[in-house]
Image: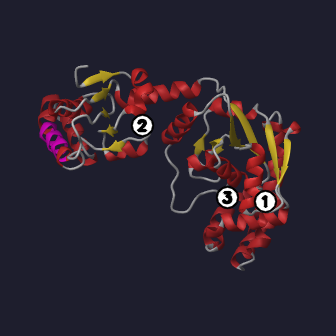
Amino acid sequence: MKYPAVLNFDTILPLLDDFDTIIDARSESEFALDHIPGAINCPVLNDAERILVGTTYKQVGSFEAKRLGAPLVAKNIAHAVETMFADKPRDWKPLVYCWRGGNRSGSMALIFAKIGWPVVQLEGGYKAFRGHVNAALEQPCKLDFRVICGTTGSGKSRLLQVLDSIGAQVLDLEQLAAHRGSVLGHLPNEPQPSQKAFETRIWELLRRFDPARPVFVESESKKVGNLRVPDAVMARMRASPCIALQLSRPNRVRLLMEDYEHFAADPAALNTQLDHLVQLHGHAKIKAWHGLANGGRMPELVDQLLVEHYDPAYLRSIDRNFAQYAGAEALELADIGPDDFLAAARHLHPA
C-alpha cells in the first residue's frame, strides 16, 4: 500500500483497533467536544491559531490564510515529531484525521509518510465518522436488553457496576452521561459530556456488544441530565423485559446518604437544586425541606423526598413507559453491602 493511504470510515472501522495511535489533528476545543474513541489530540493548529487563520481567510483571502497557516502547521507538526512521537519505531501505524480530511490531517499524514511511517488518513475526517455514528444510532437496536427497574435509591446503578465487574454486558447510561438522572443527579466537579460525545460513547459500546448475550441497562427516561438518549435505543429499552429491583425504604435512605454525600456536606447546594421542585410542590414544602437540610436532618429529608416526590413520579411513569414491567422478575436486596449486590448480579449473570 502506498502511504499516506486515504481510506473511508467504512473501510477503517473493522481495522480501528489495529492502529497503534489514533491522532485527532483538530484544535483542542474541537477534540473536547467529541472525538473518535481512543484518539489523542495533537493539534496541527490550536484554537488561537485556527481562529487567526480562519479570520484571515474570511477577511483577506484563501492564499493569505494558507501562507499564514503553513509555517504554523509545519512548526506544530515538527514539534510533535520531536516530542510526542520521537520514540515511535519504523512500523508504528497511526491513523490521522481532522474535521473533513483536508489540509490539517493531510499535512501531518504527508510528513509522517515521508519519515517512513505507514500512516492512514481518514477520508472525510471527523465529519465522516460523525455521519456513521448518526446513521448507526438511527437504526433499530436489535440487542437483547434487560431493563433494571426500581424506585430511587434501590441500587440500580450499583447493580450495573457489579454486573460489569463480573463480565456481564452493561450499558450504564448515567455513567456515560456523568449524571444520576434526576434533579439532584449532577455529579460534583464532573461536567456532562457534549451530546455528540455521549452518543459516541453509546455507539462505541453498542458496536462491541455480542447480540447473542443480554445487555443490562437501567430504566432511564429520555433525558439523562441535559443529554438525550438516542430514540432507537430508548425504543428498544422500553419494549424489553424488566427486572424489578426491590429494597426497603430505610435501606434506600442509607444508600442515598452514601451516594449523595456531597449534598449532605453542602446544604446550600442541595437547596439550590430543591428550588427546581417549587412548581411541583409549592414554596411552603420547599421551605420546609430547606429547613431539614440546613438543620442537618438529611435522613429525614431523604425519606420525605422519596415518599412525596420520587416514588410517586416513578410509579406514574414506569408502567406507562416500559411495556413489560407488569411481568417483571422481582429481585429483592436484603441490604446494601457489596455481598448483597454481588449475589444479585450473580443471579442475573451466573458464572
The location of residue 121, given as percent across then percent down, is 29, 28
The residue at which mark 3 appears reads as 276
Residue 167 to residue 287: above or below: above
Nearer the viewer's eye, disc 2 or disc 3? 2
The residue at which mark 1 appears reads as 281
Observer-nearest residue: 73 or 248?
Answer: 248
Mark 2 crowdedness (10 Å alpha carbons): few <14, some 14-19, many ≥20? some
Instruction: Name the kind of residue labelled 1 in the image.
Output: His
Q: Earlier in the sequence, mark 2 or mark 3?
A: 2
* Residue 75 is inside the magenta segment: yes
Q: Which residues are magenta?
A: 69-79
Query: Residue at (26%, 30%) from the top-left corner?
Result: 119
Q: CA distance from mark 1 to mark 2?
A: 44 Å
The location of residue 348, given as percent across then percent down, is 76, 44
Give left or right: position of 304 versus 70. Answer: right
Q: Secondary structure at mark 3?
A: helix
Q: Main secondary structure of the magenta part?
A: helix
Query: Residue at (16%, 30%) from the top-left corner?
Result: 61
Write down the quadrant of residue 143 in the picture: top right
Quadrant of image for the N terminus? top left
Q: Earlier in the sequence, mark 1 or mark 2?
A: 2
Q: Is residue 155 visible?
A: no
Task: Say the numbered circle drawn on residue 36.
Answer: 2
The location of residue 275, given as percent across then percent down, is 67, 63
Quadrant of image for the C terminus? top right
